[in-house]
Structures are given as structure tokens and as C-alpha cells.
Image: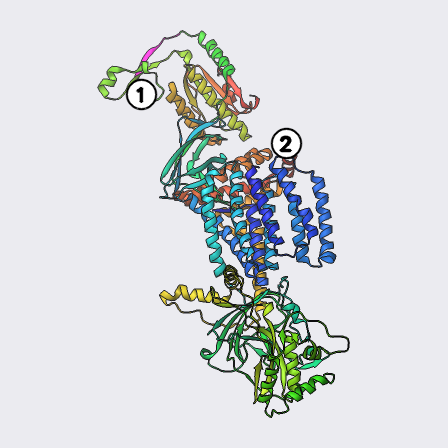
Amino acid sequence: MFTVTPEGKRLFVAVFVTGFASLNTGNNLMYMIFAMLTSILLLSLIIPYINLRGITASLKFDEPVYARTPALAGVTIVNHKKKFSSYSFRFSIPLIDDKGLYIEKIDGRSKITKTHRLLFPSRGAYSLMETILSTQFPFIFFYHRKKPQGENTLLVYPEIFEVKEKIDAVTTAVAEVQRQRSARGEEFFYIREFEYGDDVRNIHWKATAKRGDVMVKEHSLNEPDKITLVLDNISYERDDHFEKAVSFAASMATALLTNGFSIAFITGAESIPVGSGMAHKYKILDLLALLRQQKIDDCLFEEPTGSSFVLILSSKASPLSKLSSFASKTYYVDSL
Amino acid sequence: MSTRYKLITALIALTGDISLIITGEINTFFLIPGLLLFTGYYRSIKGFENADSKLISTLSIITMILFFLDAIVISGDVILAVAHLTIIFHALKSFDLRIPWDSLQVVFIALLQLLITSDLTNSMAFAVFFIIFLVLLVFLMTYSHVIKENNESIKPFIKPAIGIVILTFLLTTLFFMTIPRLRSGLWGWSNQRAIKSGFSENVELGTFGEVKLDSTIVMRVSLEPSLKNRPYWRGITFETYNDNTWRDRGNDTRRINKKENLFTIDDKERNNLIKQEIILEPLDTNILFTIKNVSSLEGYFRYINTDNDGTFSLPFKKRRQMKYTVYSTGEPLLVNESLSAYLQFPESEKETMQLALSLTEDSVTALEKTEKMSAFFRKDFVYSLSTSKPPEGRSSVEYFLFTTKRGYCEHYATAMVLMLRAAGVPARVVSGFWGGEYNQYGDYIIVRQSDAHTWVEAAVDGKWVSLEPTPPYVPEKRHAALLFLDLLKHNWNRYIVRFSKQDQQKIFRFVTSPVNMPLRPYIKIGVNPITIAALISMASILILLFFLFGKRRQRYSGISRYYNNIRAVISRKLPIKESFTASEIAFRLEAVDMETAACFREFYSCYGKARFGGRNKREYDSKCEESYKKLYGKIKALGKAQWVQALKEHNRNK
């Protein structure tokens, strides 16, 4: 796909004027100038096309990606052309990184990998099929853009922000509720397969030896460490409030899990049973990354189990606000 | 901006300026402000601050006023005035190079200068400036690209830039050879200065002396077959002589129209004729020079004129170099008219009459008389270009015949014609060129102003026999290097300046000869070529306007049209530039309504997937349409107050 730049438009005018002057006068020296400008015009179209031909690009993230948080991506550019080098082009993702990563030169049959800092404006699933290679080389008259080969989808998690004060408030509130109950202590609950983020100290070596897969012990934690997060996703008047609620829920969940709590997560039509550890965190973040607002009729809210639950509501007018009297803590997004 | 970038810009400006100067048409007065170019670029390269923009603007206005004065009063020529204007603008711009793209303005001014140069001269020096300009232009444009990408170093791009220069040069050559040519221009005129030749309908005796001192090349001729004797290039004939002046009465001038690309005078077989391929420099005459007894003539003229004297001329003077081919027999012309006009004799030349009668008293036939006359001029007469004016009351011919006995062709021819007429032999003076210098390197003859010649034709036995009364003289021989240089000039003129449709056909024949492709059939269009050209021009203008200003949606279909429509709708409400990306638009929309902005993002995501999404394209096509309708509805539903509020916020942020 080619786009004409303002300089390119001027070149067109110059070609037209020179062409007309040549035709009008029949002067061969003017035809020479016309031929030169036409050549430059043609090369401005052909060279960028050849420059990007045979170029493929792929994007790889080593760390999870969060919205509005800089993420480092490994960009691998391959030039499949046999002899020709490619010069001065950009690899970019529309809407995310319009300026893109600049590649000065890549020789024929070679590969380069560069680290590129990206900032995703919002959570969700991004198709990396939308990446673009663009170049103006060698001149400044046309932009040539093309989609490199290769396809991938990237899940961008909601933005995580600092919620230390809120966590302190939640833990205090939960502790207050729990103080009135007797603690049952830590008990062995069941054995499951190892997941990313599990503490290696929890590996059940006998079961691992028997099954041939790494197995870990899951404990039934103390009552005060179990918290259910309930996120209202049905009654938002403003989209930015909903996004704020999702980010807040993600931040709370991340902070609570990091502090050793077990978390269950409930939203309009989906729920995640109680769990802990990094794998559980990403289960919740996966859900939150793609969470959409729903109509109240589509929702099947599960009643929060256990005595400690935290409500995240759009406002006091939320239909879920009736639960607030049972909750350890209730947050209204419009007043956060 | 880097120093190198400024240096290349300066060189482009300098190339444009010097190319104008070599035409020799530039007024020295305008070169003085043009010299400021050096100061301007020196300051710029050394990192001095730009000149005050108010000062530059004021000077630009003064320059514009000067331009009008120049066009009307000083030069009296718009083209020259524009040339002067560009020189001063180059100088002003050198003090005011602000952003990298200012260099583009310098390039376009230099391009205009090159166009003017091409109109003012055919000199081979143009080729040198053209090549320099091409190389600098490619490097500057590559450098502009490098700077635009925030990459200050051009080093990695030098090799590809050299390759691009070579490619541009090859493509330019290809385009130059293949771009279709009209037979001549449309309404254009040339500003080239014509060579003062001395050929006109009235010639005063003695004017050729000045012309013969001039070594300017008038024409170059390729002859086939080559001739043993130095050829006479016939121009104009004169019949009437009075008061030291020869006049051409235009003996039954008639028009010859072109038939099948050829002006045919008679039906002689071309193989037996002398073929003369002539490249004539712009002269201040409309005469076509030929070897005598022309059978046919080929050239890019609409029609030509001829008369009974065998003179050929164009309907008007051509101020451009022109090429034509003549086929002549070289034999004497036949007398097929009344000869009384060729016996006209001025009453004042009594001594000449007596001399002629005494010389020919024993002779009976015209042939004998002509021989006597020729023998007379071979005795006691000396060829000389330095002649003195006759005393008051004395005729030039008699002063030459009886007093000085020194003179050049004009004197000899005039004297002989008058003496022949006095002896009853009809005669006339013929003006043209004689001989020329053979260039063995290029196998052609160089004819100069100094080869201008006048000789005699006498009616003998029903034929116009050429007589040469002028004593022979040895023409100046030039150095081989000069001849070689002239060959280059000749080839430049032949293959570049005068490159024509026929040359294109020859190339086409050559290229297609291995595969025996049929030649392009001769198609004659019964419409005036000017009408066709006007139609083509109008169509080109319309295409250009469409390209530059036509709405994008007219050029796209399907989902691209949706995207462009959305951009167009938003741009009516918010200040959105063409260069804005979708994310920038979404960002601005957020100030209006978050939901609409989210909707826009969703639409753009669908658009991207549908447009570039490969295998899921169909699925996303319909999704894209849905999200387009949704977004369009949302944008339309937004109140005016929201847009105004967003606009205010935008302006405040700005």
C-alpha cells in the first residue's frame, strides 16, 4: 500500500509541469528533465516495494504485558532476499506504536533481533497480525506499508496500580471478621499438577515419583487468608469507570495473592474458584483482560462463599450494592 | 540540519544558477545579488543564525516588484525575468534555511532554472549541469529521508545512493528515448538567440564581410555520397540591383504541402540523388539551404515555400535548431521562365557596361561571354575581406572593378552579374554557403558563418550554369582536438537536441528486428494535432486535480471507504490532520466521548483485521461493517456541545 506525502504531491506537480512544458515546446532538453523526474517518481515507487519484499518480522514478549505499562518486546526481523539488503524501514503496531522500531539496514539472508519498548493503551487481545512494516526509502515522496508474515495473539492484562493502602484496609477488615471465629489451622487439602508460580517447597515428591509429573500439595489455608473478590460488570454509565474497576480488581487480586491470600473471583457471568499462587493470578488476569460489560439479564452472579468478600461496584446505585452490608469491604469505583 | 546536507543544498542552488549563466542571457546586474548565495550558505554551514524572517519577507517583496519591472522594462522578457528572479530567490533562501524540507524549495527553484536553461540554449554544457543536478538531487533526497528518520549519518546509505543514481540515469535514458514525441511543440516558443546570418530579401553590398569574419557554426551536414568538389549550399537568389543593394522579387512563390512525410518537387529515384542530412542552427532567416536542383525534402514543417529560382523557405523563421533532409541531383536548374528580369541593369553603372562590352565584343555565344568574364576576374584581382568604402558619388562595383581590384565574393559576383547582363547574358546572384570543413571523425561537414558565399548563375543554353568569379582562397584548418570536440557537439545535437519520432521508430525497429515484429502501421488522424494535444493536456490536468484533491473515498472501496468516511466525518468536527494516525484520532475522540473513542478503537481493530487479516478476512469484513454502522451512529448522535467542549479543550492544551 502506498501513500503520497506532501513532498510527493509536489513532485507530481513538478512532473506534470515539466511534461506539459516539454510537450508544449517540443524541446528535447526539457524532455530530458521530464524523463529524469519520471524516473525518480518511478524509483520512489519501485525501491520501497523491493526494500520490504522478503522481510518478515516477529514479536516476542518474555514477561506478561499490562495495559499502560511499558513492556519490552523482542522483535526479530528476517531478510529472506538472497542478495539485496533492505534499508531504513520501520516495524510498528498501529494504534499501539505508530512510530515503530527503526531498522537502518539488514543484509540479504540475515536476521536481526532488537528490543523494543511498547505501551499498550488498553487491556484485551491484540492480534499481532496487525503489525506493519513501512518505509519511504530512498526518498521522501511515498510511504510504502506492508503486513509482515506471521501471526500471533497477545493478551494484554489490565493496568496494575498501587493498592497498598487498600490492601491494608481489606486485611484489617477481614481480620476483624475473623477475630470472632476460631482458626482451624493449616490442613492438607489435595495433590495437583505443578503450575507456573508454585512454590517448589510444596512439591509432593512421592506423588511426583509415582505419576511421573511434578505434583504439588495444595493446602486448605486458614480462614483469614481466603478472600472472594466480587466485581460488578453490569451497571457502568461510563466506559472509563468500567476500565478503572477492572484495573482495580486486577491490582487487588495481584496484591492479595502476592501477600499470600487465596482468592476466589466472581463477576457477572463468570467465576474462578479459590486458589493461590502465580498460576491463579494469571487465571484471574486472563479473565479480566477480556472482561466486557454485561446486561443484568445475562448475569448469573454466584453468591460469595466464605465469610470474607470484597465488593467492587460501579456506584452506590449498583444492583449489587445490597450485598455491601455482608462484605468485609466495598469499593465504589466512581469515588475511588 | 547537518553540514553535508546544507552543502548539497548549496551545490544544487549553485548548479541551477551557473546553468543559467552559461546561456549568456543573464543580465550581470542580477548576478550581483545572486553572489550573496555564497555568504548565505557559508553562514548556514558555519552555524550562524538565520536572517530575520521579516527582513527576508521584505526583500522577497522587493524582488517581486523588481521582477515585474524586469519583465516589462529591463529585460522585456518574462522568461529572462523569471531566471533573474530565481537567482535572487536562491540567494535569499540561503539566509533562511529553517527546516530540512526548505531544501526542497531550493531543488524546485533549481529545477525551474534548468528548465529555463533548456529553453535558452542547446549547448552541450547543459548535459554537464543536468548530470550534476541528477546526482545531487538523488543524494539530497536520500539525505532528506535519512534526516526524516532521525538518522544523522548518511554513511550506510552512500552505496545504495550511488546505485540509485545509476538506476535513475539508466531509466532517464530509457524514458527519454521512449516518451512519445509530437512533431513539434504546441504553442511554445523558443527564447534562443538566432545567429545573424545576413540572409534576407534585400542585401546591401558589403554586409557579407562582417559575416565572413564570424566562425560560428551555422549547420552540420552529412552527405551521401560524398562529393569530390566543395559543395555549394544554395540559399537565396537576387535578381534586381539598384543603389548598391540586391533584391529578391520572390519569383512566383508557391506552397508545397507534405505528402506521406515528404515534400516532393519531382519524382526522381532517390537512390541516385545526393542525400543531405542538415542540422541547421537557429538563424535569423527562414531560408532552407540545399544543394541545387532539389527533388524532395523531409522535415518537421507543416509546409514549405519555393519559387522558380529554386529557393526553398519556411513560412516563418524558426528560432530553434532544426533538422531536415534534402535529396538533390546537383545538376543545373533548367530555365523555364521569362529572362527579362535577369537582364536588369542599373543606368548609373556606365563604366561597367563599357568594360563588359569591350571584353565580349568578339564573343558570340553566351558560353563564350561567360568564359571571357571568368578569365577577366582571374587576372589582377585579389581576394580580401578588408575593403574600403567607395568615395561619395562612386558606385561600389565600379570602385571595385577599376580602383581597388580587392574584395570578396559579394563584390566579384555582383560585378560579374552586371557585366554579363551588360553583355546580354541573363544572370543572377546566388547567396548561400560554400564548402565547409570536413570532420573525418564524424563523417560530416561543418559549415560556419565564414563559409557564407555569393556566386553567379548565368542562363546558358537553357540552363542556369554556376560561375565562380571569386579567386580561390585556402580555408583555415582547425586542430584535430577541436574537430573531435565538434563531433561530440554534433552527436549531442543529432541524438539529444534533435532526437525525433523517426529516431524512436529506428530504435523500435532495431529492438524488434530479432523477433520480426510488425512495424507500427502508419495511422493518419484527421484531427488537428493541436486539438489532440489540447485534449490530452486537459485530460492530464483533470487527472492531476483528481489525484491531488479528489476525496479518498472515491478511490477506495469496501472497508477502506468506511475508514475514510469515518475520518472525514470526524475531521468536520475536530481538527484532524491527514497525517494523524488512528490512535491520535482515538485520543482526540476521548475528549469528546469515551464510548465513541472505544467504539472507534473497536472499529479500527476490525478494519485492521479485515484489511490485513489474511484468512479471517471475510469474517472481519462483516464485523467491520457492523462496527462501522455502530460508530457512525454514535458520532452522529453526539451533541454539538460535546464537540465544542472538546475543541475548546484541544485549543487550551495547544
x, y percentage for residue B462?
A: 57, 89
| Secondary structure of residue under mark 2 | helix
Camera-side mark, 1 or 2: 2
User: Which amino acid type is shown beneath numbered disc 2?
Assistant: Asn
Of residue B363 and residue B329, the one placed in the foreground of this image is B363
Task: Tell me if residue B487 comes above or below residue B152 in the rendering.
Answer: below
Chain at tag 1: A
- Quadrant including the C terminus of chain B: top right
Q: Is residue B326 magenta?
A: no
The image quarter containing residue B45 is top right
Q: Are marks 1 and 2 on the same chain?
A: no
Of residue A247 and residue A159, the one placed in the foreground of this image is A159
Of residue B171 and residue B582, the one placed in the foreground of this image is B171
Residue at image mark 1:
A194
Task: Tell me if residue B597 comes above or below residue A49 in the rendering.
Answer: above
Residue B254 seen from this side? no
Chain at tag 2: B
Give the image's coloring scheme. rainbow
| Secondary structure of residue under mark 1 | loop
x, y percentage for residue B122?
A: 57, 60
User: Which amino acid type is shown beneath numbered disc 1?
Assistant: Phe
Task: Tell me if residue B236 comes above or below residue A3 in the rendering.
Answer: below
On the rendered structure, is B245 left or right of A134? Answer: right
Name which residue lies at 56% across and 66% down.
B476
Residue at image mark 2:
B653
The image quarter containing residue B446 is bottom right
On the rendered structure, is B25 left or right of B559? Answer: right
The image quarter containing residue A227 is top left
The magenta region covers A183-191
Name which residue lies at 42% across and 67% down.
B509
